[in-house]
Image (cartoon, helix red, strand yellow):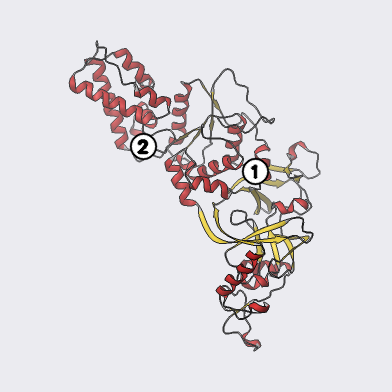
Amino acid sequence: MLKWDDKPRPTLKIQGSIKVIAFLENLGCSESNLGDLRAEIAARYFAKKKASFVAEGKIDPSFELLNRLYQSDRIWLRSRQVNDETKIDICYTPSSKALERIKAGEDTWSKALGNKTRKKIRISSGIILKFVSEDKQVSIDVFTTDWSPSPAACAVALHRLHPFLSRYPGVPLTGSHFTGEYVRHPLTGDLLPVWTADWVRADFGTGAVLVNPAHSQADLEFGRKVGLPIKFSLMPDCASDDPNSWPQPPVVRTGTVARSGRFDGLKWNEAEAAFYEVLQARGLAEKVADISLASVSIASISFSNTGSFSILTNRKFLDAAQGKQPWRANVEFSAIYRFMDRALSCDAETLVASSYSMKKVGPIIISLLMDIGVDYLDTDLVVSGPAECNIQSIPDSKLRLALLVGGNLSEPIVVNQQLVDKVEGFLKSLHRCRTELGGGELTPPHDIKSHLKQDRPKEAFRSLVRWQKECLKDNRKVDINALNETCSWFFVPTLSKA
């Protein structure tokens, strides 16, 4: 069951002791709508356990999940233009701690899904540099893979929701802005201004960038835009005192160190080693392997009027719809946010989605739950799959049975002709059993029920098919009532009439 704590949150009135199922709305299932169909089959399957279903629109999205992610420093803002209107995407990016758990195999829901997640994880080697504020009260950690030109750094740039900016609530949501704050360069002691910048992302490194306009194309464009100095600390081998040979930015991982005192004359890679030795001795640098996964937009903000409007107060997103501000902010939540909000609000015990959707957002679901501290290990995951045959020619009863028994509910499946043939063969053998082998006391294996209790219909079906073949081969008389009861667990009596 998904449950985070006892704080007030939206509730759904439910009668009796039941199992709540949350459905992820369709994010692009195949034209055959197999995702929706398998979700229906899964719902019927769990309904036999007195399940209730959470449908879209039953609960309005709350801001609680958004604020939990914000306070965990897991979201950032990205602006974009839509029909001459600025929209601000609220993006979630998984923490390295969650990704390390997934990489270690703690996702547990689905082996196939976990493998896909692990393939998408990026690992980058570099160092963390610590920049202490001028008042020595706080510091900023910056991850970088190239610190050879760091003596020429002239600023630190942050994404808008970086924790350092909690002290500066007046900084606008978008654009490039000087915060008025300075931090000490850990190598030189220089005071570097702290800026916010839209181009700084939180899904790589720490969400903070050391700005070296002479030695990075992105930094160069930012420096020219806001008027930062462009200083060289690496000089190409061809450079000299002749103005005609002066370097052109950006100079990246080449040349020798200049204007760095005792380090002058070192090759760029020798400078990296020398700088790190000094910084490590000062306790201001550490070698790390950054582990990251691409972020995803979970909501977007738009405004009914132009102007300066802060939707952030005291490290919280405000539900502007309930306020009386002169500029109203409209927040549109994405499908993945609505899905997770419903599931958490209702303590859902089962999540249902198509394999197409899970391929896109499955890793995000797992890491998001880890990042907000939700214990999801007892939660069921039902995943549908695509079709590789002409499903229009398959009778509805056979298609539905194939969707149930073609794979365990937590694993994506493919509906192909081989699977359909297997179902058809089972139904023909079942008819023979009912008409030729009645009057006995032989019952289906007990492991069928145990497999079903553990949500493994594939293994249960395989056991039933094997038992049925043996009975027909040896002409064993069976208990037809017991056989029919077992088949009802697969909805066969109803589906065979369709």
Q: What is the residue that sits farthest to the top in this orientation?
A: 439
Comparing 105 with 175, the one in front is 105
CA gap between label 1 and label 2 equals 37 Å
Q: Position of residue 108 (x, y in %)?
A: 47, 39
Q: Position of residue 287 (x, y in %)?
A: 57, 61
Q: Residues within 10 Å of mark 2 (few under 14, many from 20)?
A: many
- For the question of whether residue 259 can be seen, the reply is no
Q: Three-letter amino acid code at disc 2?
A: Val
> Which quadrant of the view contains residue 371?
top right
The residue where tag 2 is placed is 415
Q: Residue at x 37, y 19 (%)?
A: 488
Left or right: residue 8 versus residue 252 is right
Q: Position of residue 128 (x, y in %)?
A: 62, 60
Left or right: residue 167 versus residue 26 is right
> Which quadrant of the view contains residue 418?
top left
Q: Position of residue 124 (x, y in %)?
A: 53, 59
> Quick one: SS at disc 2?
loop
Q: Residue at x 57, y 41 (%)?
A: 370
Comparing 360 with 388, the one in front is 360
Comparing 424 with 203, the one in front is 203
Q: Three-letter amino acid code at disc 1?
A: Leu
Q: Earlier in the sequence, mark 1 or mark 2?
A: 1
Where, quadrant-wise, is the N terminus in this rendering? top right
Q: Are marks 1 and 2 in contact (CB under 8 Å)?
A: no
Circle on res. 69: 1
Circle on res. 450: none
Q: What is the residue that sits farthest to the left in this orientation?
A: 474
